[in-house]
Image (cartoon, helix red, strand yellow):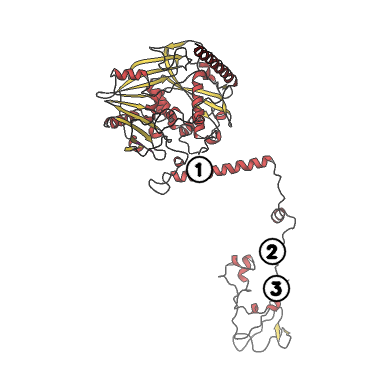
Amino acid sequence: MGFDVGFVPFNPDGWGPPETPATLLHPKHGGGTLLANVPFAPFSRSDKLGRVADWTRNPNFSRSGGGRDAVFDFALDESFAGAASGADDSSFRLVDGKPPPRPKFGPRWRFNQRPQLPQRRDEEVEARKREAEKERARRDRLYHLNRRSSAPFGGPGYGNSRRDSPALKSSVDIQPEWTMLDQIPFSTFSKLSFSVPDPPEDLLICGALESYDRSFDRVNPKNERRLEHFKSRNFFKVTTTDDPVIRRLAADDKATVFATDAILSALMCAPRSVYSWDIIIQRVGNKLFFDKRDGSQLDLLSVNESSQELLPEAKEDINSIHSLAIEATYINQNFSQQVLARDGNKATFDEPNPFASEGEDVASVAYRYRRWKIDEGTYLITRCELHSTTDVKGQRGFLTLNALNEFDHKYSGVDWRQKLETQRGAVLATELKNNANKLAKWTAQALLAGADLMKLGYVSRVHPRDHFNHVILSVTGYKPKDFAAQINLNTSNMWGIVKSIVDLCMKLNEGKYVLVKDPVKPQVRIYEVPADAFENEYVEEPLPEEEQVQPLKEDPVASAMDAAAEAEASGADGEKLATASAA
């Protein structure tokens, strides 16, 4: 079977088709003839001929979707005469261009078109939703806090971080009659440096110490110990001028500057502080006394002070700043007494406890009075605290005992019960971030007291909503100098801060002054106050009973015994009065 070219007419008169029609023609309706088996589009001489192939057209945007054959599609070509004749196109279609119908019962149609049925709203679903909302709110809060804290100095948003919370107030009410003398930003403290002779001179040691129980070194989250309450033992927080030993040393002209380790450590670690605090400075003659107020913030331990996570503002909340400070203080006191051997053997020193009366049950503590040379003719005497003794290479060594407390791991993001054994470094790093000032002050106090070791306990609540009962999860020991290097605490910078404050106060006139940490800005201010400031008859009033440091939980048996004793005492007094009146 060959290819039939067909009959090609010959034009003997020239080029092009002959004027006479070819023989192989078919009759056309309405007259005329057409070539056989050849599609022919009617045209007149005034019409433009169409393109054979349009290679300039983009086939991707062809409405017909013809693919690679779209270059031969002349349906959109206006020059093609056949496009104008829609009679044949309307009745003839090669390809169906309609999209395929969507199934009525497909998975997409079922979930997108039909209304969703109401889900089962049980307690588990509601709890999950609440947790998700809390987590989302916490992320949003942290995002905004990070944006504000990363704002450039002096720019918009600078200083509007967590420290600007309305809950952070000044530790003391600034009175209108006070005169501000100086304002010192913390940025100047970081550049100070001063070295003191080491070791300092020991003048006197008072009190008695019990030995440390080494079995607490083996405590772990799987072998936890319940924290006991020592209500019968008394703890003393006596300020500088009320200390009879310091009064005696001042009368003997042993030094010119006097302070306690708690006050001195607050000064040394001032750049790390966030909450407001205040120190009373008294210039008497050529002597300088650093004091604290009764019920001062220096008597309480801060919790999450340098954390970016906001604590509840309500004072009655168990996780508020005030509630956590009281809880941490009592945990620290009970921990320092529980880890002792308590075998009745006590190490005694030069003098007994200067603040305890005879026969009183006092906590295991020794007061070490030490003297440093600040400048030519300027000496500093500080009362330092030691909490226990232990054997260090066959010799008696001194310990300081402190406890970190976990109240809710959702605030810190680290669960101590899961991470203490495997990731102790991560737990300590989190505490250094959230409690930088507290750990720095503990380290400074251990360095001032000349302790051989500082023991850190990890104490957690039995349940996050139970702030009465606690357990000891672990106890770790550090050398104060090594731990100071680990937390980047520079002793030369600490003494540089103290010397700058001492030099500044020595230039003041005799009188009473107060050094106040600003609750918002990283700076301290010095005010000149009247001589009767902070006395009983002055503006300051005693704290309400609910704000005073009290035991966390009263023992009903002890309360009943106290009530019976009071009743018996009142009865005896009544009998004496009756006898006196009869006489």
Dot 3 and dot 1 residues touching (CB under 8 Å): no
Residue 317 on image: x %, y %: 55, 35
| Mark closer to the observer (3, 1) | 1
Q: Secondary structure at mark 2?
A: loop
Residue lying at 57% horizontally and 27% vertically, measured from the top left: 468
Q: Taking 164 as reference, is 68 above or below it?
A: below
Residue 3 numbered tag? 3
Q: Which residues are magenta?
A: 518-525
Residue 158 appears in the rendering: yes
Residue 142 numbered tag? 1
Q: Secondary structure at mark 3?
A: loop
Residue 401 on image: x %, y %: 46, 21
Report the predominant secondary structure element of the magenta stretch.
loop
Residue assigned mark 2: 99
Q: Secondary structure at mark 1?
A: helix
Q: Quadrant of residue 537?
A: top left
